[in-house]
Structure formats: C-alpha cells, structure tokens
Amino acid sequence: MKILLLRGTGFLGRAATAALWAGNHAVTVHTRGLGHRYPDRLRALEPDCVVDLCSGSEPEAASLVQVFEGRVPHVVVASSLDVYRAWARFHGLEPGPADPFPLTEEAPLRETRFPRRAWADERRSWRRNQDKLLVEQTVRGRLPVTLLRLPYIWGPGDH
C-alpha cells in the first residue's frame, strides 16, 4: 500500500514510519504541514492512504480536506483524548461531576472550544488554536476517515 505520512519525523511519526515500513508499505514521509506550496506534489503521489499526525486546528484540517477530498481512498487522522468531556472536567475546563469509568468511544464530548488556550504561552503558542474536536468535525463526512483518539503517550524519544 502507498502511504503518505504527514509530520512523520516527530515522536509519533518515527514509530509510525518504522511500523509501516516493517509492514512492507511504500511510505512517503512529509515533514511539514500541508501549507500552500505542496498540494500538487502531495496529490501527485496518489497515496492509497494519508496518515495525518499534524492537524491540530480547524484550518489545518481544512487544508487536509482541500488537498485530498475526493482524491484519496482513506485518511487516518490522529486526534486526542482531549475531545472527551471527562478530560475537560478533569482539568477544570467544564463544570460538573466526573464521568463514570471506563470511558468508551461513545463517551460525551466536551462543549468548550480551544481547551489549551489557558496553557498557551510564548513557547507554546500553538496551543491557542489547537482543538482536536474541531479537527474531527472538519474532516468527518468530507474524507473517508478513521479518527484515532490517542491517549497520553510517553516513551523513548518523547520530549
């Protein structure tokens, strides 16, 4: 299978690239976001699947849709556990009692937007516009997508 891996050189990307190569897939790793300079080159690759590890905001997800809508058989988008109401309540971003455990994929989603803005500073300004819930809403229904809601991840190479 021909796979295009977006942001494939970071912490998750290195592990994903190694696993895909081990599975004998033809992997092209793109190290930057979609931007405005690369869409034609990325489309020309004609991937069977795009794995997006970089869309963290609604505009980034809209770029993914713009580049690949109607042009790729499948897309995998890395999301986050921060889409759940339980996460927002745990961090004091939404009122209410804790949700019962264990959580399932059907657990209630948070209602607040841009949950990481309170934690944004000069070094972490990307947090101002990050919202994986908006990413999910932007791609769902427009791309043939699997949303992969990742938990907190630690391990070798994690910064």
Image (tube, rainbow, N blue to C red):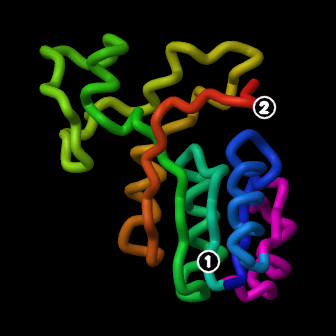
Of the pair 127 and 54, the residue shown nearer to us: 54
Q: Which residue is mark 1?
A: 49
Query: Measuring 73% from the left and 28% from the top, which residue is drawn there?
Result: 158
Q: Secondary structure at mark 1?
A: strand
Of the pair 115 and 8, the residue shown nearer to us: 8
Query: Could you say where residue 60 lies in the image, as x and y percent from the top left?
Result: 62, 54
Of the pair 19 and 112, the residue shown nearer to us: 19
Disc 2 versus disc 1: nearer the observer = 2
Query: Measuring 54% from the left and 52% from the top, which residue is drawn there?
Result: 78
Tell me which segment is drawn in magenta: 27-47
**Type of amino acid at the residue the image marks with label 1:** Cys
Confirm whether the magenta stretch covers residue 42: yes
Confirm whether the magenta stretch covers residue 17: no
Query: Measuring 78% from the left and 73% from the top, which residue is drawn there?
Result: 27
Q: Which residue is mark 2?
A: 157
Q: Secondary structure at mark 2?
A: loop
